[in-house]
Amino acid sequence: MPDIRDDLHQALSDPDPVRRAQIQMHKPLAKRFYKSVGIGPAEDGGHAILLDGRTVRTPAKHYLTVPTQAAATLLAAEWDAQKDEIDPATMPVTRLANTAIDGVSKDIRAVFDDILNFAGTDLLCYRASDPEGLVARQSERWDPLITWAAEKLGARFVLVEGVVHQLQPRAAINGVAEALRAYATPLGLACLHTITTLTGSALIAIAFAEKQLSAQEAWALAHLDEDWQIEHWGTDDEAFQRRENRWREMQAATATLDALR
């Protein structure tokens, strides 16, 4: 039986969707070699993904296991959905789990701190000075989240016009850090880091985790400026496809985070 690790490691684990596409363009897709996909108990008390009864391994040769049955179900569905060939582009939850197991677990603090770095330059804090309609829309849709962060997290952020860096109060960053600690597991942080990088906002990521936003609402808030531009100037097929690819990554991260609850 072929070893899945030999054929899929790079394509399943590279965090850059463009890089993954390049890998897949230069390398034929691996043939599906298994008949059944299952879920079994893992030694650490979690849930392992089984192909014909054998546990799948990550690129670093760890067992592909997750802490909840719901998360394992998401993984199993991706593997089961593969047809004659295994297409890593259609397996974002598997890539996320691989990242958590092989990468985040080795240095949780670095990932935690990187999310806090985003909070220091959070998208929601940088406002347009014009046009008037965009300014009003940002205030209408972003201000409630800024208020929520101040009241519920004790994180009071300074808002500025333009893109010149604004140093945020240490107390605001500490408030985000306190909220983030509730999700400081490898897979939890992998999910939140993905949401943060896709939206440009640690506040949006934390608000989703705290059930203040749905995935669709979080995505819309993150793309408020872009949607304004599209309304007035339109878009092109390439930009639309890039956004669709990122949305699939967002859906995988939010669904996985929900499955960890």
Image (spheres, helix red, strand yellow):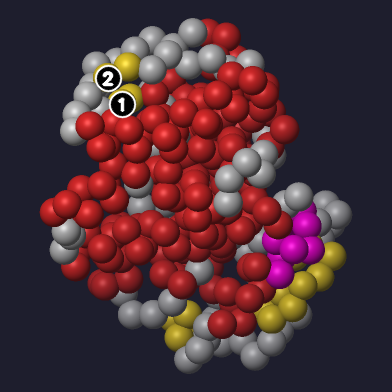
- Left/right placement of residue 112 relative to residue 185 reads left
At 52% from the left and 83% from the top, the residue drawn is: 82
Q: Are marks 1 and 2 in contact (CB under 8 Å)?
A: yes
Asked if one can make out residue 50 in the rendered structure from this viewpoint, the answer is yes
Q: Residue at x 69, y 87 (%)?
A: 36
Give the extent of the magenta segment: 65-73
- Specify the amino acid type for callout 2: Glu
Q: Nearer the viewer, residue 67 or 261?
A: 261
Magenta residue check for 184: no
Quarter of the image with the N terminus in it = bottom right
Q: Residue at x 59, y 77 (%)?
A: 79
**Residue 228 screen position, x and y as percent:** 25, 47
- Pointer 1: what residue? 127
Residue at mark 1 to residue at mark 2: CA–CA distance = 5 Å
The front one of 50 and 120 is: 120
**Is 71 colored magenta in this rendering?**
yes
Residue 102 visible to an observer of this rendering: no
Q: Could you say whether the residue bearing mark 1 is in a helix, strand or loop? A: strand
On the image, the x and y values in percent for residue 6 come to: 48, 70
Secondary structure of residue under mark 2:
strand
The image quarter containing residue 123 is top left
> Which residue occupies the foreground of this view, 139 or 156?
139
Tell me if mark 1 has few (under 14), some (14-19) or many (20+) residues whose alpha carbon lies within 10 angstroms of its own: some
Badge count: 2
The image quarter in which residue 165 lies:
top left
Q: Residue at x 43, y 20 (%)?
A: 120
- Residue receiving disc 2: 161
Percent of width and height locating residue 136: 32, 33
Q: Residues within 10 Å of mark 2 (few under 14, many from 20)?
A: some
Q: Is residue 158 above or below residue 41?
A: above
Q: Quick one: label 1 or label 2, which is nearer the N terminus?
A: 1
